[in-house]
Image: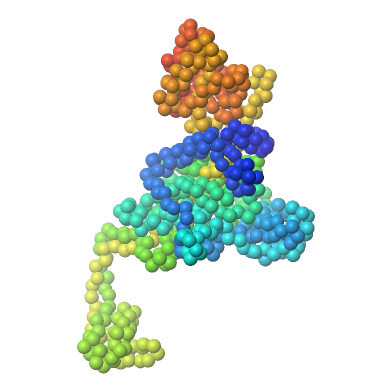
């Protein structure tokens, strides 16, 4: 396990070196909003690219890009308008707003108060004598109420049509599902991905980039038949730290190491499909620079699950903020598709052809309207419909009838001659049926992942009696593949260095030319931002055509021909060849 650094140092480095900037800083900033600087954007893009590589390229879960503003109907159907809320407490004296569950977690032994009923939270705040963290006033009388986290907006001028900024990317996939199922030719299972911004009006976001009001998600909705499960064998040997409900509820219980295969065999993770995505997440996290010793998967407690989820395992990383949730793998059942079908009146089912047609017998009525019309006048239509229903549901009423059948419409009884009901039995061939797919959703919070990668890669050591900070980022996430320095910017060294820079760029490698300051300081600058290799052009380059190449982690240096630099850098950053063997 890497040592946990001081948060201030990491955040200071991230800001100073161009990873993260507080948004609207010149206007005093606002909590819950952070921008990515050039290096942060590059690191985030690398993380996004490798996520795409995993799910879109290797699994074929194709990507969509839906709007971030949604009509109110979408979020009424999804349940967010009603249920996507946190518990809000406000100080009666200074008016500061707090998350009531966080107040309880911070001042009691309760580790997780998310999802606790409002009156219980209020009771604990009063019983424990919790005071306002801002002004010290006792919060006994503070009312605890629900606060919906969605940002509301109006679509078009006036206030006629309400809309919301999306609180998760997932709904765009569910709302487009009718077209997506046709795109996939109604062939289950299939996955759809989306990467983009989500918005939540968090009550009191004080954890830097960990709790944002505008953040980025990468989500996969995996649609499957109810009985269908993904084969876990490709990830069965992947080791994971699991923290199931039983361990959390047991005093002294803790996360334990097992493999994905064992977790399924032992029933620790009930759904093989969830277990599969836990395994894939573990592999991916390790590949982008998350420390496996600071990564665990924690099962949600029953009162913690989102309104749509029947089981959920969160990927959590250990950071200076404690354990933070970086992703969730949730079983959303058919909840969302069912709700959108109910609210829109549209068919969300996927047509599934049976292997063999099923022949069923059905009972029907086909009333003779030339008899019912003259006999019952305006009520004839409703009586005919009542006969059809009765034939379907109570065929014996027709079979046992001697010569008449009675139906009730609006509390009134009507008797119809049996031969005018058109009752009969017939065979019906069914070739398939519409089923609502089940959904398993791995959902990743990119900002928390990027921040965890930075913290887990941050290290301090001593080189040549001098302390240095170094980001030990894996080459696939580091913003640059290599830095190129001329020892001095005279005597033609600069031209040689620019030539190497161009050759590396031409080869598609990400490179930074740096000609300012003492060479030692340039090395330190690039250690700090995580550049894996540094190439230095010196006077010998002019003589023998060789350059120095330096390894960020060990600071070891080798002398190599400048014509071989592109191959060297590519081997180390793309082909996993060690610095010694390149
Ligand atoms: N579609 C499922 C969903 O949105 P979630 O657990 O609410 O589930 C998924 O969000 C991920 O998004 C979380 O695991 C977390 O990493 C990230 N996330 C959620 N709220 C966030 C916030 N306010 N700031 C930054 N990231 C957040």
Residue found at x 63% / y 45%: 27
What colouring does the structure picture have?
rainbow
* Residue at image coords 65%, 60%: 88
User: What's the residue at 23%, 75% (across, down)?
Assistant: 426
Q: Quadrant of the N terminus?
A: top right
The quarter holding residue 129 reads: bottom right
Q: In which quarter of the image is residue 466?
A: top right
Residue at 26% x, 66% y is 430
Q: Indicate left or right for 327 with 509 as reference.
A: right
Nearest to the observer: residue 393 or residue 571: 571
Q: Can residue 558 be seen in this view?
A: no
Q: Is residue 472 left or right of residue 46?
A: right
Residue 579: image location, x then y, percent? 50, 21
In terms of image quadrants, where is residue 99?
A: bottom right
Q: Position of residue 519 (x, y in %)?
A: 59, 18
Q: Where is residue 118 in the image (x, y as percent from the top left)?
A: 65, 64
Q: Is residue 135 above or below residue 159?
A: above
Query: Image height check: is 383 above or below 568?
Result: below
Which residue sits furthest front?
157
Where does the image place residue 526, in percent across and percent down from the top left?
A: 57, 25
Residue 461 is left or right of residue 574, and the answer is: right
Give the tally of numbered discs.
0
Residue 117 seen anywhere in this rendered image of the structure: yes
Comparing 571 with 562, the one in front is 562
Residue farthest to the top, as pictured: 543
Seen in the picture, residue 559 relative to 262 is either above or below; the reply is: above
Residue closest to the eye, 244 or 26: 26
Check the image and report above or below for 281 versus 404: above
């Amino acid at each position: 396990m890497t040592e946990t650094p001081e948060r201030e140092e990491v955040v200071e480095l991230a800001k100073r070196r161009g990873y993260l900037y507080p948004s609207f800083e010149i206007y005093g900033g606002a909590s819950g909003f952070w921008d990515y600087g050039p290096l942060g954007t590059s690191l985030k893009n690398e993380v996004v690219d490798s996520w795409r590589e995993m799910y879109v390229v290797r699994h074929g879960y194709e990507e969509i890009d839906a709007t971030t503003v949604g009509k109110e109907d979408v979020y009424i159907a999804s349940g967010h308008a009603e249920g996507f809320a946190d518990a809000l407490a406000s100080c009666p004296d200074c008016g500061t707003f707090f998350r009531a569950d966080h107040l309880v977690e911070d001042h009691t032994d309760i580790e997780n108060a998310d999802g606790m009923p409002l009156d219980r939270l209020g009771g604990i705040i009063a019983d424990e004598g919790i005071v306002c963290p801002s002004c010290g006033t006792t919060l006994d009388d503070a009312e605890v109420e629900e606060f919906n986290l969605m940002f509301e907006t109006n679509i078009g001028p006036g206030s006629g049509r309400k809309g919301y900024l999306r609180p998760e990317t997932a709904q765009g996939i569910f709302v487009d599902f009718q077209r997506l199922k046709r795109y996939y030719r109604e062939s289950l299972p299939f996955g759809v991905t989306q990467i983009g911004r989500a918005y939540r009006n968090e009550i009191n976001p004080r954890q830097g980039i960990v709790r944002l009001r505008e953040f980025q998600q990468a989500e996969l909705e995996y649609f499957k038949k109810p009985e269908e499960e993904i084969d876990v064998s490709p990830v069965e040997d992947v080791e994971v730290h699991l923290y199931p409900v039983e361990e959390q509820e047991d005093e002294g219980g803790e996360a334990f190491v097992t493999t994905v295969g064992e977790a399924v065999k032992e029933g620790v993770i009930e759904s093989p499909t969830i277990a599969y995505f836990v395994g894939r997440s573990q592999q991916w996290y390790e590949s982008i620079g998350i420390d496996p010793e600071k990564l665990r998967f924690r099962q949600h407690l029953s009162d913690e699950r989102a309104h749509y989820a029947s089981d959920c395992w969160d990927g959590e990383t250990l950071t200076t903020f404690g354990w933070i949730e970086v992703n969730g793998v949730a079983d959303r059942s058919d909840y969302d598709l069912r709700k959108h079908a109910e609210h829109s009146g549209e068919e969300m089912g996927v047509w599934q052809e049976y292997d063999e047609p099923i022949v069923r017998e059905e009972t029907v009525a086909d009333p003779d309207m030339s008899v019912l019309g003259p006999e019952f006048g305006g009520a004839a239509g409703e009586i005919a419909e009542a006969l059809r229903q009765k034939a379907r549901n109570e065929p014996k009423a027709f079979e046992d009838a001697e010569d008449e059948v009675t139906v009730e419409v609006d509390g009134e009884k009507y008797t119809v001659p049996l031969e005018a009901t058109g009752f009969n039995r017939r065979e019906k061939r069914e070739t398939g049926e519409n089923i609502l797919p089940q959904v398993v959703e791995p959902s990743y919070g990119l900002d928390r992942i990027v921040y965890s990668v930075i913290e887990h890669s941050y290290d301090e050591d001593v080189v040549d009696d001098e302390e240095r900070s170094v980001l030990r980022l894996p080459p696939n996430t580091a913003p640059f593949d290599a830095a190129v320095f001329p020892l001095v910017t005279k005597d033609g060294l600069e031209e040689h260095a620019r030539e190497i820079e161009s050759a590396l760029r031409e080869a598609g490698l990400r490179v930074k030319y740096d000609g300012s300051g003492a060479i030692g300081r340039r090395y330190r600058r690039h250690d700090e931002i995580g550049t894996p290799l540094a190439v230095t052009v010196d006077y010998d380059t002019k003589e023998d055509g060789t350059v120095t190449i330096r390894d960020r982690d060990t600071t070891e240096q080798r002398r190599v021909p400048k014509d071989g630099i592109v191959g060297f850098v590519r081997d180390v950053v793309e082909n996993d060849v060690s610095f010694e063997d390149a």
